[in-house]
Amino acid sequence: MKKKLRSLVLVLIILPLLSILISDYIIQSASKGKTFNNIKQIPKNRVGLVLGTSSKLMEGGNNPYYTNRIQATIALFKAGKIDFVLVSGEKSPYYNEPNTFKKDLILGGIPEDKIFLDYAGFRTLDSMVRAKEVFGLVSVTVISQKFQNERAIYLADKKGLTAIGFNATDLEGSEGFKVQVREYLARVKVFIDLLLNTQPKFYGDKIQIK
């Protein structure tokens, strides 16, 4: 009985670990050579898709993930690597990610008429599918930290959207540890969503970026 119990415990430990390792390997491999740190090396795309996040931390203070994505988007636009910005994030009664991004992007020098907002980017999956199905994009430059860019690129490919990523500065050490742990779990969720053919929460009327 004890031997069977130990075997069951081992299976319960090993299977989730294997799922995490395999999911991470597949996504990293599929996105290899498709994310860029150097603005001079990244190819031009008409539209840059910046993935939303809260501008503030739960404990207070500015969210560096947000700040770094803002800086990366402005740098891409000013370098002529994108002509338009699509901000995809969540709108709720408590906060409005796309509008907050828009205000800071305008302050950074991007004209208001070059910025489009997707208020239903609740998840990376939603953002990538809606970029294609709602906003009519064929190719796009995703703007986020590298870990999310890799996952977004993989999802885009599976949904018929050609994507590359421009990597906003990430956080190292303990500051980014919790986010990295969540990312490993999110990568496993990618394959569950693909297996179940999970769809975005909303679609809506088509919007042309021009």
Image (spheres, rainbow, N blue to C red):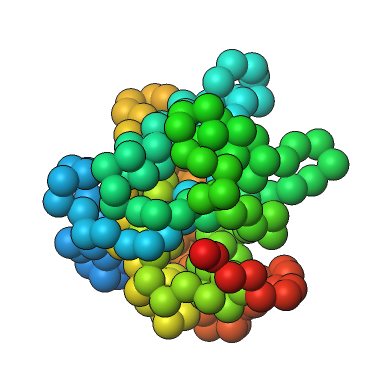
Instruction: In the displayed orientation, state which residue is furthest to the top.
Output: 61
Q: Position of residue 68 (x, y in %)?
A: 41, 32
Q: Residue at x 58, y 70 (%)?
A: 208
- Where is residue 129, by image quadrant? bottom right
Up/down of 183 relative to 108, above or below: below
Locate residue 164: give its quadrant.
bottom left
Q: Nearer the viewer, residue 164 or 46?
A: 46
Q: Position of residue 170 (x, y in %)?
A: 34, 35
Identify the residue shown where x is 42% and y is 60%: 47
Which one is nearer the viewer's eye here, 18 or 190? Answer: 190
Measuring from the top left, give residue 196's x and y in whole percent. Answer: 60, 82
Q: Which residue lies at the image location 45% right of the left edge and 44% below the top edge?
A: 181
In this picture, residue 190 sits left or right of residue 91: left
Q: Is residue 191 left or right of residue 26?
A: right
Write down the quadrant of residue 25 in the picture.
bottom left
123 lies above or below 176:
below
Relative image position of residue 135 (x, y in whole percent)? 57, 70
**Does residue 95 appear left or right of residue 175 in this picture?**
right
Residue beneath the point at 64% across and 45% down: 98
Q: Quadrant of the N terminus?
A: bottom right
Q: Is residue 137 visible?
A: yes
Q: How many marks?
A: 0
The one nearer the camera, 97 or 155, is 97
Note whether residue 14 is visible: no
**View extreme (left): residue:** 41
